[in-house]
Image (cartoon, rainbow, N blue to C red):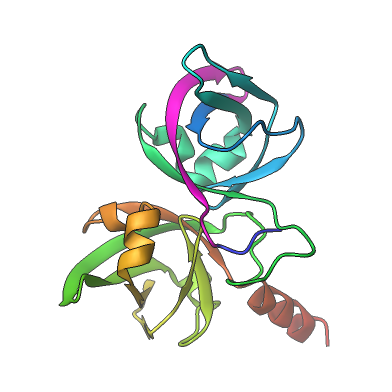
Amino acid sequence: MFTGLVTAIGHLETREVLPSGQKLAFLHPYAALELGESVAVSGTCLTIIADTERAQGERLFSVELSEETLRLTGLGELPLGAKVNLERALLSHERLGGHFVTGHIDGIARVNERKELGSDMTEFALSVPRELGRYIAKKGSITVAGVSLTVNEVSDSAEETEFRFVVIPHTKSHTTLGELVPGSQAAIEVDLLARYMERLEQTR
């Protein structure tokens, strides 16, 4: 379980194509990570299969991604050197500053608009297919590229749902959201509570 509060930025260092997926290695600033530990990489919960220290003191963790994970998250298309948002799994005694995030990506959102608001704040408009849009609500929570955000506005068209949120300067400087431009894509996870509410309604 995660909170959507990014704690570090990593960089994609290597990619190895496997018979049924890919093996990725990321440079990271954490101390040694434990084998089997979960880390959210731009919102995707991944399991550490190795963590090594290089000669210059840099640390590198490796993960394996299935074809399904690659399809849903877009991680398989990242160029070498790309930045990623990182968050280690939540400890039970820590403050829950964001919202409950599982790291199970629901789909990919497209950036439609980026608007500078002044005071270095930026408003983004993203769109998702309508089947995901039904889980997005005004003033509700959503995770974009691993970052917990509050939805400001939601609008539906025949095929898509567009939602808007504002990113403050601190979030832009400590995550990769500041690099989003129209046409960019980002992995999203909808609010877990919306999923359970739908299931309860279906089985009443």
Quadrant of the rendered image containing residue 158: bottom left
In depth, the one of 1 and 164 nearer the eye is: 1
Which residue is at a point 62% across and 34% down the rendered structure image? 31
Region of the chain picked out in magenta, as a range? 5-21
Judge whether 100 appears above or below 181 on screen: below
Decide if residue 24 is in sight here.
no
Residue 62 relative to residue 1: left or right: left
- Say which of 85 and 18 sits in front: 85
Vertically, is 145 above or below 80? below
Q: Main secondary structure of the magenta part?
A: strand
Camera-nearest residue between 178 and 160: 178
Instruction: Single out the residue that lies furthest toward the right.
Output: 204
* Residue 148 % position (x, y): 51, 67
**Residue ID at (62%, 24%):** 20
Question: Is residue 11 part of the magenta span, yes or no?
Answer: yes
The image quadrant where one finds the C terminus is bottom right
Position of residue 133 measured from the top left corner of the image (x, y, whole percent): 47, 74
Q: Quadrant of the N terminus?
A: bottom right
Q: Position of residue 38 (x, y in %)?
A: 70, 43
| Residue 192 percent location from the top left of the image | 66, 71
In this rendering, the count of numbered labels is: 0
Is residue 172 covered in magenta?
A: no
